Structure formats: structure tokens, C-alpha cells
Image (cartoon, grey):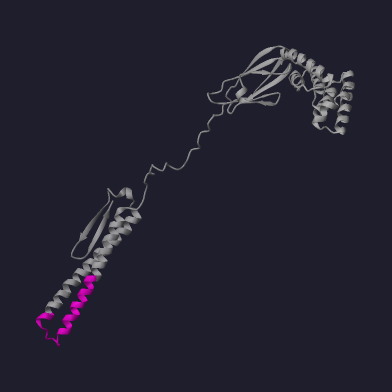
Amino acid sequence: MLLTSLTPAVAAQQVSATDKETARGLMDLGRQAEANGDYQGAAKAYEGADRIMGVPSTALSLGRAQMQLGKLVAARDALLRAARYPEKPHEPKVFTEARREAQLLAESLGRRIPTLTIQIRGLPEGAEAAVTVDGEPVEAALIGLPRRIDPGTHVVSAKGTGFRDVNREVTLAEEQTETLVLTLEPDGTPLTPSPAPSSTLPEDVAPPQTGGISPWVWVGLGIGGAGIVAGSVTGGLSLSAVASAKDQCEGNACPGAAKSDADRGKVLGHISTVSFVVGGAGLVTALMAGLFLSSEDADTAAVLPLVSPEHVGVRLRF
């Protein structure tokens, strides 16, 4: 039994007696499975023993079982680990022999492992594809570089945004070197989505003016307001002048100053009346313009004064 002579070397690893006994049992189980042609079961048992002991003999047994399964990459990894196991003084002879055999097998196996180079075409500059081999992702930096892979049939897939998925099978024999080119084709969808049309205009573009308040509304309100204010002021002054004239009269006898105040009151009264009429006309203009005109009619509309002995007013034309 290989592990009966491992005690001096594994003592430094502080492997418990229980673990060492478990490893011995697993090695026995592996040899049994290997003798029956069950290399899958043998590899599983040897792997358990190697995880516990990690010595050249367990790694060598694991590597040989994996070689039988066609897992050449994993087998060579185990064999190199056995070959590179540090040599120690007074180590068991089985370690030395396992290290030598593992080195020879690793060198021979290195020549048998196939090489696959995956190339991607059809992508725009700067774009990357997601590539997998047998479902395992391949780093983008490794695309286009030789890849060591087990012999047999493999499924290589590539995906890119805006492109149809590509799936290819490739079968490799031992020692074969192969280049697989995957060409991605657009799937018809835009690489950069077009922005949805917006109903709003850019901030620096003013929307066209439609309708709006006619400037004649503001003109009318201005005239109306000014007329009413003027009428109120002159009306007040007229009433004050008339009252002053009456205060100066005794019966029908009035001094000259009273007549002057009375005349001034009449003039201010007329001015007040006219001011109220103009103010009213301005307010009517504002009302009519607000009802019938928009800002677009400002150039064609006009306000015409109407003055006659009977009345004073305005006429709105548009």
C-alpha cells in the first residue's frame, strides 16, 4: 500500500490520523475502481485522497485516472503538481519514484493536448463578444490566442449586442491545432436605440406664438384707466369750484370772484365728462379686442374715434 510509507513526510503537514486512514481507504477504493475499468469512480476517490495528503503518489494516481477519461488538461495539471512536489531529506522512495514518473507523463501529455484558437469577426471596432466553450466563459483578453483544450467535441458560443447568437461544434483529436472563426451577423436591431420623439421643443427654441392677447386690450385698458382717473380728478375739482362760488354769494348777489369760480367749475365739469367718455371708450375697446382680436390681428386692427355733437365714442376695425 502506497500510503503505509507516507508517515514521515506527512507528519510535517499535521494530517490527523483519521484523515490519513481515510486517505488510505480512498486509495484502495480508487485502485479497485480502476481495476474494474471505472475510471470516473477511480478519479473521484484519488482526488479525495490527494486533497487530504497532497503528496506525489496521490497526485500521480489522480493524473493517470484523468488521462484514462480523456481529461488531458486536468491530468497534466495533477502530474506537474506531483513532479514539482518539493524533495525532502529522507523522503520515502515511493515519493521519488512518483515524482519521476509524473514528470515523464507530463512531458508526453503536453504534446498530446490539442490547441484551439477562437476568432470573432463581424463586430465593430471596440465591441466585444461574450464567448463560452462548453458553457464556460472565455475572457475577452484570451480571444484570438491559442487555447489548450481536451480532445473531443466542444460547443463554442458567441453573443454580441445587436447580433445573432452563433453556436458551433468543433471536434479535436489529440495533438491537433485548430482555428475556429465565428462571424457575428446583425440581428436587425440598432446598436444604439434611437431616442423617442419628443413633443417638447429644445430649450433654446421658442415655440411659435399662436393666438394670445391683442395689444389693443392693453391700449384700451390704459386709455380707460387714464380717462377714469382724469374724470374723477377734474370732477372733484369742478364740484369744489362750484361750492366755493355758492359760498361767496348772498342771495342773487355774487362778487366777481364767485363768477370766476363758477366758470372754472363749468370748464372742469366738461373736462371731467369728456374724460369719463374717453375712459369708457377705452374700456370698451379693451373688451372688444379681448373678445374678437388676437395678437396676430394687431397689424390689421385699428381704433377710430367717433366725435359728433350728439356723442363721443370709438369704432374698432379689423
Residue 94 visible: yes
**Magenta residues?**
233-258
Q: Give the overall secondary structure of the magenta segment.
A: helix
Q: Name the residue rendered at 71%, 19% in the picture.
A: 154
Residue 173 visible: no
* 162 within the magenta span: no
In the image, residue 209 lies at what x, y percent? 36, 46
Q: In this view, does 153 lie to the left or right of 257?
A: right
Q: In this view, does 80 lie to the left or right of 34?
A: left
Q: Name the residue rendered at 20%, 80% in the picture.
A: 243
Q: Which residue lies furthest to the front in this view?
A: 89
Query: Closest to the observer: 16 or 90?
Result: 90
Q: Which residue lies furthest to the left in this view?
A: 256
Q: Residue furthest bottom?
A: 251
Q: Is residue 61 left or right of residue 177?
A: right
Query: Closest to the observer: 60 or 117?
Result: 60
Q: Quadrant of residue 263?
A: bottom left
